[in-house]
Amino acid sequence: MIFRQLFDNASSTYTYLLADERSREAIIIDSVFEQSARDLALIRELDLKLLYAIDTHCHADHVTGAWLMKQKTGCTIGAAKVIGAANVDVGLEHRDVISFGRHSLEVRATPGHTNGCLTYVTEDQARAFTGDALLIRGCGRADFQQGNAGMLYDSISEQILSLPDACLIYPGHDYSGRTVSSVAEEKAFNARIGGGANKGDFVGYMDAMQLPHPKHIDIALPANMVSGKPEDGNLPAEPAWAPVTLTFAGVMEVEPAWTAEHLAQVYLLDVREPEECIPGETTMADAGIPLGQLRDRLTEIPRDKPVLAICRSGRRSAMAAGILRNAGFEQVASVAGGILRWKDEGLALKA
């Protein structure tokens, strides 16, 4: 199985991408709206076909990226049926199974933090994605949004800690840099439900907690009740001056073929060293400024055209694009694959 754990700093949310290595069919769990471009870049680079965008519950701290994922990939949106959220394609219930290639996730209802909390367990019970029901050495709060501490105790005990001790626990959040735990660890060391705590111990702990109102709940809840669809129904704005692609590394790129077809409309900047520019292997660049000199020669670059940086492989030009963007150039990108791809695609060269 292909497995990736992704993180959103603003909300301390973990997003999980799972895929079958053979079929390339994939599922994303708890996507974050603002991180959708990053997640889509990873899906594209790994050559995956996203089948499902699913959530563990109706989040109060961030807006789901499920609707946006569907617009971009055609995937199916899944969430707990009891939530009643709009734009959900599949209302999930206890013991449902979600398949992707040779793999699957079992749906386990784990209410208590909210009434629509779900835990997803891989078919081999090696991994459990627990959302906010069970966190690493903690659990979700139970003092708002249909929270019920006694119900949460039962959910964790019966549906999560009943899994094999070796089953890895992947939570929806962590605020201390922790990434993974296990059933055995949480049974022994969880500060709220571990170490032999009974229901009375747990409920007493939870009832004594005094936590502030979630900061983003007034924005997140309404948005998540429509699966993250913006009020205007529009996709986030994307660059209109070129078919720019964001890589998982965070680099804005355009394809060599598009660049070659639009040379009159862009400023092509070669950032290789002079000795690299072999006659017959030079692009149709407007100018050449070695990367190491770029910061000192920014005034030589016009600002009335989009600027596309190119180098041998696309690595130095990615740095050049970042330098230009930091210097205030808004329409700027790197030519994907550099001279190597330019030549491979048979595009025009000049001596």
Image (cartoon, helix red, strand yellow):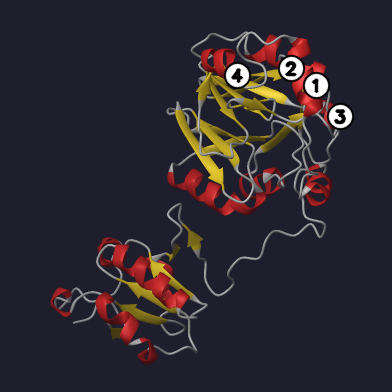
Mark 4 and mark 2 in contact? Answer it, CB < 8 Å. no
Is any part of residue 76 visible from this angle? yes
- Amino acid type at circle 2 is Phe
Is any part of residue 260 visible from this angle? no
Report which residue position mark 3 lands on.
Answer: 146
Vertical arrangement, residue 189 with respect to residue 47, above or below: above
Report which residue position mark 4 lands on.
Answer: 121
* Distance between the alpha carbons at the discs numbered 4 and 1: 22 Å
Mark 1 and mark 2 in contact? Answer it, CB < 8 Å. yes
Could you tell me which quadrant the N terminus lies in? top left
User: Which class describes the residues within 10 Å of circle 1: few (<14), some (14-19), or many (20+)?
Assistant: many
Percent coordinates x, y for residue 192 in the rendering: 67, 21
* Distance between the alpha carbons at the discs numbered 3 and 4: 24 Å
Report which residue position mark 2 lands on.
Answer: 202
- Amino acid type at circle 4 is Val
Judge depth for marks 3 and 2 and give the one in front.
Answer: 2
User: Which class describes the residues within 10 Å of circle 3: few (<14), some (14-19), or many (20+)?
Assistant: few
Residue at (59, 40) in percent of width and height: 175
Mark linked to residue 149: 1
* Front one among 344 and 291: 291
